[in-house]
Amino acid sequence: MFYGEYEHTLDNKGRVIIPAKFREILKENYTEKFYITRGLDQCLFVFTEEGWKSQEKKFRDMPFTKGEARQFNRLYFSGACDAVCDKQGRILIPDYLKKYACIDADVVIIGVSDRIEIWSKDKWNQFYENNHGNFETLAEKLITD
């Protein structure tokens, strides 16, 4: 559903433009509201409402008697907020999420199939530099015929 890599800059109010291609996909699927939360590797995860409900059910079904499940759910859900694009296609990223993802101005927004990820440009460049050489090795380990 979401694919590609786009560079943007936060405006002076802390808003970022969601790429037009992603907004088109959201519109085609009648999705206005989506959810942003702490992601893995210090990025932010952005889910459609449908995708968020799927994530919520999966994590809600984890046994709360397990400490790790409680810790994960607290961090994941306490960081979540809903968002709707304004008329210019911008969303406001809350300060606590910008702090978590080390976002100050420049961001990279990537499509990862069923979700969007928002990265600090520096963090994305670091992640990409450290991992792009492993692409074929990862494919060999993870993809079966």
Image (cartoon, rainbow, N blue to C red):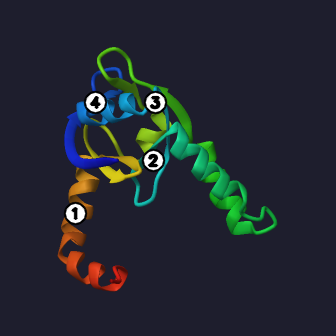
Residue 62: horizontal and vertical position, in percent?
A: 71, 63
SS for dot 1 = helix
Q: Looking at the picture, does residue 11 appear above or below residue 54?
A: above
Give the residue number, with chain letter if any, for mark 1.
128
Foreground residue among 60 and 93: 60
Residue 59: horizontal and vertical position, in percent?
A: 65, 57
Looking at the rendered structure, the kind of residue marked 3 is Thr
SS for dot 3 = loop
Name the N-terminal-most of marks 2 and 4: 4
Task: State the separation of the CA atoms marked 1 and 4.
Answer: 21 Å
Give the residue number, with chain letter if any, for mark 4.
10
Q: Which mark is residue 37?
A: none
Looking at the image, is mark 2 or mark 3 nearer the viewer? 3
Residue 121: horizontal and vertical position, in percent?
A: 23, 47
Q: Are marks 1 and 4 in contact (CB under 8 Å)?
A: no
Residue at figure coordinates x 20%, y 42% from the top left:
6
Residue 48: horizontal and vertical position, in percent?
A: 47, 39
Q: Are marks 3 and 4 in contact (CB under 8 Å)?
A: no
Task: State the separation of the CA atoms marked 2 and 3.
Answer: 26 Å
Give the residue number, with chain letter if any, for mark 2.
100
Instruction: Give the class, few, some or many, for how many residues have Cα within 10 Å of label 4's Cα (few <14, many ≥20).
Output: some
Res. 37 visible in picture? yes
Task: State the separation of the CA atoms marked 1 and 2.
Answer: 19 Å
Instruction: Give the class, few, some or many, for how many residues have Cα within 10 Å of label 1's Cα (few <14, many ≥20).
Output: few
Q: Looking at the picture, does residue 108 appear above or below residue 83?
A: below
Task: State the separation of the CA atoms marked 2 and 4.
Answer: 16 Å
Res. 73 visible in picture? no
SS for dot 4 = loop
Give the residue number, with chain letter if any, for mark 3.
31
Looking at the rendered structure, the kind of residue marked 4 is Leu
